[in-house]
């Protein structure tokens, strides 16, 4: 029995594996992914959400600054002339086709 154990130890030594903890370079079973590292799709999904949020935030800030300056230049004040209820109705109506398309998938 010692011979088998010695042969296994020699084989592991040649492969660069030690008897202790697994190293990141040589997992015990290469067919099973390491559970501590998130999948690439998860990382890409989080990154895309972050980039979209940054783009929307930046675009909204720029639009607010430009439209406020335009409004002050044209009317002398930055007060909106469209009632908030009408504005919300228009925005809600614009979102309807997207909701319909998403529900059909």
Image: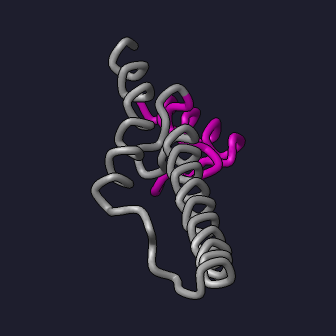
Magenta span includes 38: no
Q: Position of residue 82 (x, y in %)?
A: 41, 62
- How many marks are shown on the rendered structure? 0
Left or right of 52 in this view: 90: left
Q: Tell me where the magenta segment starts and ends, as one range.
A: 1-30
Q: Residue at x 60, y 76 (%)?
A: 71
Residue at 58 percent of width and 41 percent of height: 40
Residue farthest along the left direction in this orientation = 85
| 39 up-or-down from 64: above or below | above
User: Up-down: is 34 above or below 105?
Assistant: below
Indicate the quadrant where residue 1 lies: top left
Pick the residue in front: 33 or 100: 100
The front one of 63 and 16 is 63
Tell me residue 53's x, y (percent).
Answer: 53, 59
Residue drawn at the location 44% of the way across and 28% of the way down: 98
Residue 26 lies in the magenta stretch: yes
């Amino acid at each position: 029995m010692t011979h088998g154990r010695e042969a296994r130890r020699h084989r592991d030594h040649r492969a660069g594996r030690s008897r202790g903890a697994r190293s990141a370079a040589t997992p015990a079973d290469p067919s099973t992914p390491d559970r501590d590292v998130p999948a690439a799709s998860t990382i890409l999904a989080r990154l895309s959400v972050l980039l979209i949020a940054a783009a929307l935030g930046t675009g909204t800030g720029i639009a607010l600054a430009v439209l406020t300056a335009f409004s002050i230049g044209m009317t002398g004040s930055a007060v909106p002339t469209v009632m908030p209820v009408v504005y919300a109705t228009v925005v809600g109506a614009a979102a309807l086709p997207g909701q319909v398309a998403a529900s059909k998938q």
